[in-house]
Image: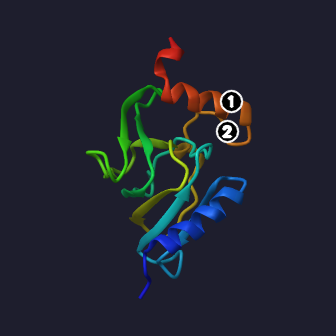
Amino acid sequence: MKVIDNKLFDSLTEEARINPRLRKNYNFHDSLDEPIHRLLNAVEPGTYVQPHRHSNPDKEEIFFVLRGKIVFFIFNDDGSIEKAIEMSPDSDVKGLEIRAGVWHSLVVVESGTILYEIKSGPYVRLSPENIAPWAPAPDDKKAVDEYIIRLLNPELSS
């Protein structure tokens, strides 16, 4: 049995804060080859999840926000925002399911945010056609910071 409690959340949050990527996974699945992946994802403000999709192989994902707050983004093929959804345990939307092939990302709003994620396995590294060409690369810190600001404040883009 694996217990999901505040002690685990706090430990993962501390690990995420010191990780250069500002996130830390806790896998419930024992192997990356398993057909279903279940994990906690501790994410901190400033982490960058480059917009991506899961096609070929098609994979659906389900997210629940257990603690903290995020804004989840669904994008059109040209990179324009189709939907921005604020999610937290206290908001109306606490989770969502993303169909395979849908461009998506998230921005972390509150420190200490914990997500529970379920997706199809086995693990397959994203191929280049599944990484958004219209979004900055993770190693371009300045462009990433500006992109996150524009996502949260779309009026600045006009």
Compared with residue 156, is residue 66 higher up or lower down, i.e. above or below? Answer: below
Identify the element where label 2 is drawn: loop
- Residue for point 61% across, 47% down: 47
Residue 156 lies, in percent from the top left, at 53, 16
Which dot marks residue 143? 1
Residue furthest to the bottom in view is: 1
Viewer-closest of 75 and 11: 11
Type of amino acid at the residue the image marks with label 1: Ala
**Horizontal and vertical percent for residue 73?**
42, 38
- Residue at image x 48%, y 43%? 106
Is residue 117 left or right of 33 when viewed as pictured? Answer: left
Residue 118: image quadrant is bottom left
Foreground residue, 16 or 111? 111
Q: Is residue 70 above or below residue 40?
A: above
Report the front residue among 60 and 138: 138
Q: What residue is shown at x 47% (from left), y 78% (from top)?
A: 29
- Please tell me which of labels 2 and 1 falls first in the chain: 2
Would residue 19 be visible to someone looking at this image?
Answer: yes
Task: Identify which residue is drawn at 52% across, 73% down.
Answer: 8
Q: Residues within 10 Å of mark 2 (few under 14, many from 20)?
A: some
Helix, strand or loop at label 1? It is helix
Find residue 137 and name its label.
Answer: 2
Q: Are marks 2 and 1 in contact (CB under 8 Å)?
A: yes
Three-letter code, disc 2: Ala
Furthest-left residue in view? Answer: 92
